[in-house]
Amino acid sequence: MLSFIVPAYNEESLIGQTLEALARAARAVEEPYEIVVADDASTDRTAAIAEAHGARVVRVDRRQIAATRNAGALEATGDKLIFVDADTLVNEAVIRAAIEAMNRGAVGGGSAVNFDGRLPRYAELIHPMMVRFFRAAGLACGCFLFCTRPGFNATGGFDEELFASEEIWMSRALKRQGQFVVLREAVMTSGRKLRMYSGKEVLRLFAGILVSGPKALRSRDGLDVWYSGRREDPDLVG
């Protein structure tokens, strides 16, 4: 069975579309499935919307993405796990490709990623380079990662010492267990954070991580892109 695991924090505006897309894709590939939403201390209607869409909701109060993903995986019962962010839309092609990859023996993988809506110029420039880099490096982007249950268990799950980039650690951990593939099929994720933060803000964030090294990822401090709570898409405000 497929287990879709959706970590979420205050995603009432987008999670309904995400869950509808998951259900459509799962029905199209004719696989039994479940959807587990790991709700990490949301203060809005995220949990209620998830339940209304038939998802099983796991309550988490960690404000940490890795721990939230792990809580969802612990609740899931499937032998194939697909982690999808609450602002990301999948399609039949990418889900079918992920299933086929695991059926052929891959322990896990990721996909290409497109962004919705208008993107600032800096994001338009770096997006294709990042897609090529992640494919060449054999790394999954955070919004979509899949793996087998045995593969997940063998890694011990996402590293809960990390507050960001846990998908990179998980990609490397899965690669040590077997074949890891980055699909050419793409998911569509929200470009709102690229619209919310200027190029200077993003550059400052990643420059700080580079200067501080891995320890910068072991604290929520300074990781505002992931933890500030800003959710309003500038293109939808006003």
Image (cartoon, rainbow, N blue to C red):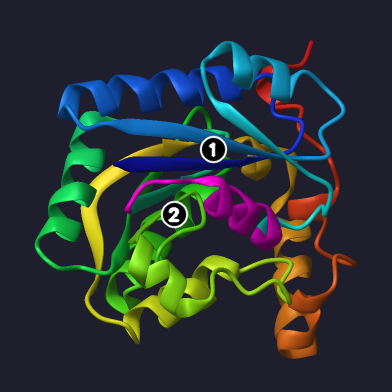
Say which residue appears at 83% left-offset and 39% top-offset: 41
Residue 18 within the magenta-colored segment of the rendering: no
Q: Which of 42 and 32 is in front in this view?
A: 32
Residue 52's image quarter? top right
Residue 119's disc number:
1
**Tag 1–tag 2 contact (CB < 8 Å):** yes
Q: What stretch is highlighted in magenta?
A: 66-79
Q: What residue type is labelled 2?
A: His
Query: Quick check: 87 left or right of 116?
Result: right
Query: Quick check: 61 left or right of 100?
Result: right
Tag 2 residue: 127
On the question of residue 89 being in view, the answer is no
Q: Is mark 2 on a helix, strand or loop?
A: helix
Residue 172's image quarter? bottom left
Query: Quick check: 234 left or right of 115?
Result: right
Q: Which of 30 and 88 is in front in this view?
A: 30
Depicted 96 relative to depicted 68: above or below: above
Which numbered disc, 1 or 2, marks the residue that appears first in the sequence?
Answer: 1
